Image: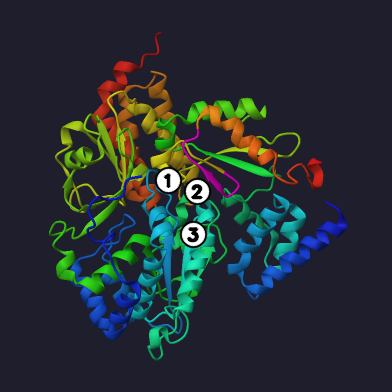
């Protein structure tokens, strides 16, 4: 991370923390912000966040490690989360999972080398009547079939500016 | 997806503004009294009487009080709150206003799960619209001295945060690890203030009850489980979706409604619920028999029940917060046992030990997650042991 980038992020962290009067109840909203902006929460960011809330960095680390939507490892621009819970499983999640791996050339838990996609399993998405379901960032996709997978991936790849990747994945 | 054909309680028509106006004419004890008479129990799954919760929060001493909506719907097979948050958001917020009036709270929080981020924008628009209509903000609908507002707090992907003390920990910026109870959130909740944490469906149901009367509500359901309930139905049936049905319905009748008559088993209550085999389909869905937060998963004749048990146990291994030993290690040990069964190398003696471990977890885990994690395991082993042993053999 460039020093200027860190300063920029730090400014955003402090701005958000201030909204919560630097009270700890603002910690998770700040972490969500950092996760959105830099697609992970780096050790440096954790230091800056800890400072903003006047807590020990390990407290921040403890929170980050607890929640599945926060991560210390850099995620792709688009995080694909396929529901692995029972109803989606029975509706054919395994075939969709297989095709996602084929189309992206990675396994679950990995990120494509161009930094575009991360593939993950997640627990129940609340779309059990319309499975298999998956999230791509915040968008929900239901009744996904192996044939539809390529189109869905392509629709994200072709988004305006999607190819622009910042940070170490570039 | 099919909504209820019949509009019973939750899906029945209501003029939200008028209902709220009428409610604010009543006294606080009257509102809590009406909810008490209705026998309404928490719709998230635990089934705690709503009026008792509100009454405790109302009676608790505190400068600030909070009304918190638990929209962290994460139980496998549950999606009714998604429908309510999408199509009945105004009723939900009005229900929160009603609760706030009853307990004397000024602040409301909707704890929305991260997986439902796509609902946030519309939900915020509804809240803003209601501010415009004076149903939120200062002097609500002209009621002197009654101020209340709501904001949304996003979760970050943790099933355990549906447990109310874990939810509060999360709101306060901590790991979502459940607290020891007592003290209960109604006395020591968010930021140490009295807080009433209720499920989405509970708020909406309470709004209908206060407007239409406890007597009307009690025309549905059974004596101990009054009213109707939303059921999220998925799995091997023709018409999955959200249904509003009276409490006390038999599983058989429910399966007829959704086109799943040939089911060999039904999981009632999600991963933390019970697996009911075909021979018990005359059992009724109610707090006094098979309880549920609304999750119904239908298993067709061809389903392998051991695979089902493994899927559920993997879920608990991932979602256990790791705070207490029975849950953290128990879920792992049960999953290992299920894998041994799957590979056909589990002795009956060891299986009995695993069942005893499951019972220990039910007794000694700190919160509802660990206490209910072995339920599916135990009921599937009990009912499908011979099927499992017949289909698995290590000497292939």
Q: State the extent of the magenta-drawn residues as a range.
A: A136-144
Earlier in the chain: of badge 2 and badge 1, it is 2
Could you tell me how far apart the alpha carbons at marks 2 and 3 are, in whole angstroms? 23 Å
Whether residue A137 appears in magenta in the rendering, the answer is yes
Out of A111 and B328, give the one closest to the viewer. A111
Residue B383 image point, x, y percent: 24, 30
Q: Which residue bears the numbered disc 1? A: B327
Earlier in the chain: of badge 3 and badge 1, it is 3
> The residue marked by circle 1 belongs to what chain?
B
Q: Are marks 2 and 1 in contact (CB under 8 Å)?
A: yes
Name the residue furthest top.
B396
Earlier in the chain: of badge 2 and badge 3, it is 3
Residue B207 image point, x, y percent: 30, 70
- Quick one: label 3, few (<14), some, or many (20+) residues within 10 Å? many
> The C terminus of chain B is located in which quarter?
top left
Residue B72 visible somewhere in the drawing: yes
Out of B367 and B100, give the one closest to the viewer. B100
Q: Which residue bears the numbered disc 3? A: B112
Could you tell me how far apart the alpha carbons at marks 3 and 1 are, in whole angstroms? 25 Å
Q: Which residue bears the numbered disc 2? A: B322
């Amino acid at each position: 991370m460039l020093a200027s980038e860190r300063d920029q992020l730090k400014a955003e962290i402090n701005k958000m923390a201030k909204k919560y009067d630097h009270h700890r109840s603002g910690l998770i909203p700040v972490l969500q912000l950092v996760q959105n902006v830099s697609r992970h929460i780096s050790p440096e960011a954790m230091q800056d966040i800890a400072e903003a809330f006047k807590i020990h960095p390990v407290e921040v680390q403890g929170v980050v490690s607890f929640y599945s939507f926060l991560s210390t490892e850099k995620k792709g621009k688009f995080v694909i989360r396929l529901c692995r819970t029972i109803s989606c499983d029975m509706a054919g999640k395994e075939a969709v999972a297989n095709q996602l791996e084929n189309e992206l050339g990675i396994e679950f838990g990995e990120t494509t080398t161009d930094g575009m996609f991360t593939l993950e399993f997640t627990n129940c998405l609340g779309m059990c009547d319309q499975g298999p379901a998956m999230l791509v960032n915040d968008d929900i996709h239901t009744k996904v079939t192996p044939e539809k997978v390529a189109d869905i991936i392509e629709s994200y790849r072709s988004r305006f500016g999607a190819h622009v990747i910042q940070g170490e994945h570039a | 997806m099919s909504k209820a054909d019949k509009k019973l309680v939750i899906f029945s028509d209501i003029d939200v503004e008028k209902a709220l106006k009428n409610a604010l004419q009543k006294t606080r004890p009257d509102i809590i009294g009406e909810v008490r008479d209705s026998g309404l129990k928490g719709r998230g799954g635990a089934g705690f009487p709503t009026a008792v919760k509100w009454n405790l929060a109302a009676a608790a001493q505190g400068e600030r009080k909070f009304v918190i909506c638990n929209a962290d719907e994460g139980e496998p097979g549950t999606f009714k709150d998604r429908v309510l948050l999408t199509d009945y958001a105004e009723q939900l917020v009005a229900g929160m206003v009603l609760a706030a009036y009853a307990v004397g709270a000024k602040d409301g929080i909707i704890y929305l799960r991260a997986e439902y981020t796509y609902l946030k924008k519309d939900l915020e628009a509804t809240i803003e619209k209601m501010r415009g209509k004076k149903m939120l903000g200062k002097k609500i609908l002209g009621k002197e001295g009654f101020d209340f507002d709501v904001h949304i707090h996003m979760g970050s992907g943790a099933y355990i945060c549906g447990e109310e003390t874990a939810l509060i920990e999360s709101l306060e910026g901590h790991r979502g690890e459940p607290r020891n109870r007592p003290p209960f959130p109604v006395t020591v909740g968010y930021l140490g203030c009295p807080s009433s944490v209720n499920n989405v469906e509970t708020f909406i149901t309470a709004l209908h009850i206060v407007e239409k009367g406890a007597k009307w509500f009690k025309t549905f359901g059974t004596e101990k489980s009054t009213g109707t309930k939303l059921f999220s139905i998925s799995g091997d049936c023709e018409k999955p979706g959200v249904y509003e049905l009276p409490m006390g319905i038999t599983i058989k009748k429910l399966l007829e409604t959704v086109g799943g008559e040939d089911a060999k088993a039904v999981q009632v209550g999600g991963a933390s619920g019970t697996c009911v085999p075909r021979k018990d389909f005359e059992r009724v869905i109610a707090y006094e028999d098979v309880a549920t937060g609304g999750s119904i998963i239908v298993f067709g004749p061809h389903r392998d029940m051991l695979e089902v048990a493994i899927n559920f146990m993997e879920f608990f291994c991932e979602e256990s917060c790791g705070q207490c030993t029975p849950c953290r290690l128990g879920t792992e040990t049960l999953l290992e046992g299920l894998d041994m069964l799957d590979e056909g190398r589990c002795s009956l003696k060891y299986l009995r030990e695993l069942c005893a471990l499951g019972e220990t977890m039910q007794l000694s885990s700190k919160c509802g997650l660990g206490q209910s994690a072995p339920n599916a395991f135990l009921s599937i082993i009990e009912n499908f042991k011979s099927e499992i042993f017949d289909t698995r053999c290590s000497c292939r």
